[in-house]
Image (tube, helix red, strand yellow):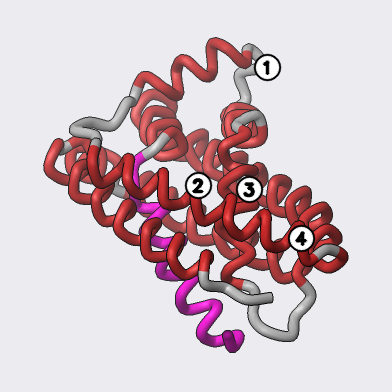
């Protein structure tokens, strides 16, 4: 895979993933509605920083392991493909009909780290192991041929953080209409099914990847 193919396909996948409503979306929208745009932007920066931290941890550990072991590469490939396929099937067969806006409030009560929107966004992301598992499963298949795995994976994580921040700014700029749109059952179901289909496609692609 060339760098151009890698970045274009990853940008498409990461973009659709970012558009799918989840905990991060709920946190940004809730903060914008209750505390204003500036604090919502701080939450978005906290979330993006969390992505960079996860990206660095995955890049450092995963890059070394994949470079050293053919067995580790094969195990990770099939584990990642199975995980992505499971996520895709869940989204296709059991799409949500609503976005859980209360999730961000619950996570804030559990964390009790402080009132800073940046800290809430940061720790809400860093303390979510699903982000790390997803990065381990998802990012390796987009590494361009001939490039070192670790730095490239961190670059992809940074790209995801940028895409997420841009989407958060868009949501903050149009909090009310986007919030209403993202809460529509038909929109939530459609985005879940679209994301599920893409996850299944990438699961097959990952399973067929050769070192």
- Of 192 and 206, the residue lying toward us: 206
Residue 200 lies in the magenta stretch: no
Which residue is at 67% across, 55% downward? 75
Mark whose residue sits in front, 3 or 4: 4
Q: Is residue 150 visible?
A: no
Mark whose residue sits in front, 1 or 2: 2
The numbered mark at residue 51 is 3
Mark closer to the chain start, 1 or 2: 2
Which residue is at 25% across, 46% downward? 92
Whole-angstrom CA distance, mark 1 to mark 4, is 40 Å
Mark closer to the chain start, 2 or 4: 4
Q: Which residue is mark 1?
A: 113
Q: Which residue is mark 2?
A: 83
What is the span of residues highlighted in magenta in the rendered image? 1-21
Q: Is residue 55 visible?
A: yes
Which residue is at 51% across, 34% downward? 39
Mark closer to the chain start, 2 or 3: 3
Describe residue 161's horizontal placement relative to residue 71 as left or right: left
Q: Which residue is mark 4?
A: 71
């Amino acid at each position: 895979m060339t760098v151009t193919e890698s970045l274009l396909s990853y940008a498409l996948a990461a973009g659709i993933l970012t558009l799918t409503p989840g905990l991060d979306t709920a946190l940004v929208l809730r903060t914008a509605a209750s505390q204003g745009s500036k604090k919502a932007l701080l939450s978005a920066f906290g979330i993006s920083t969390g992505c960079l931290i996860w990206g660095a941890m995955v890049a450092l550990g995963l890059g070394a392991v994949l470079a050293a072991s053919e067995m580790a590469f094969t195990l990770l490939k099939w584990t990642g493909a199975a995980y992505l396929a499971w996520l895709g099937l869940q989204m296709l067969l059991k799409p949500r009909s609503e976005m859980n806006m209360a999730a961000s409030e619950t996570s804030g009560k559990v964390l009790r780290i402080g009132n800073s929107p940046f800290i809430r966004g940061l720790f809400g992301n860093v303390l979510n192991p699903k982000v790390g598992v997803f990065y381990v499963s998802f990012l390796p298949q987009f590494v361009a041929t001939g490039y070192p795995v670790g730095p490239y994976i961190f670059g992809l994580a940074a790209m995801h953080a940028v895409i997420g921040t841009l989407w958060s700014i868009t949501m903050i700029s149009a909090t009310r209409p986007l919030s209403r749109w993202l809460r529509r059952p038909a929109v939530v179901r459609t985005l879940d099914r679209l994301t599920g289909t893409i996850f299944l496609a990438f699961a097959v692609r990952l399973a067929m990847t050769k070192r």
